[in-house]
Amino acid sequence: MTMLVEVENFLPDKLVDELVKFSKGNVPWELQEKQEHLPRRKISLLLESLIETTHNWFAQCSMFSHLNFIGITLWKDFTDFWINVHLDNDSVKVARQIYLDNRNSPGTQFGDRMIKYGRNRGYIMYNNPNMLHGVPDMTPHEGRLSVYALFN
């Protein structure tokens, strides 16, 4: 089984456009748990909003119906964001990160493979002890906006 799949045009275009617009509004960005020291903010749950709509879209995606869907997080990474190479915790079986806009910003590095940052592109990662990844220090960049979905 391939442990890393690069994807393009993963989400419906209308949903991507709406998420970008939503992110620019007056929304309750919070610190990301276990990453409080990083220049990253998140929205994980906001009922009766586009966040709930996006959550439901991922929950109904048949590609991973055999897994337990945990939820989504909308991430906003600031222009000085980067993160060292790391492994995700064992409870994560599959993660999907979909970038939402086009900016001059780094994607995610998996060994010698870079998943390029760009609108409606990203990756599906099947977590395992060899799945080291990170965001290289290319600061300052233009920031990043993405949806991160978890399954176990």
Image (cartoon, rainbow, N blue to C red):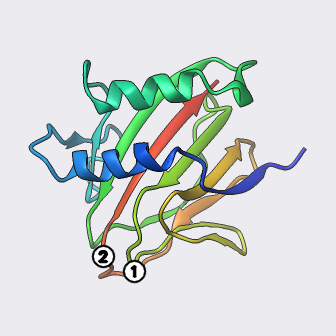
User: How many numbered discs?
Assistant: 2
Q: Please tell me which of labels 1 and 2 falls first in the chain.
A: 1
Above or below, 91 against 129 in this view is: above
In the rendered image, the quadrant that contains the C terminus is top right
Picture residue at 29% right of the left edge, 82% below the top: 140
Picture residue at 28% right of the left edge, 72% below the top: 80
Q: Residue furthest left?
A: 26
Q: Which amino acid does the dot numbered 2 rest on?
A: Glu
The answer to which image quadrant residue 83 occupies is: bottom left
Q: Position of residue 61 (x, y in %)?
A: 63, 27
Q: Which amino acid does the dot numbered 1 rest on?
A: Asn
> Pointer 2: residues within 10 angstroms few (<14), some, or many (20+)?
some
The reply, left or right, for residue 47 in relation to residue 73 is: left
Q: Position of residue 64 (x, y in %)?
A: 71, 27
Residue at numbered disc 1: 104
Residue at numbered disc 2: 142
Q: Position of residue 143 (x, y in %)?
A: 31, 69
Q: Give the secondary structure at mark 2.
A: loop
In the rendered image, the quadrant that contains the N terminus is top right
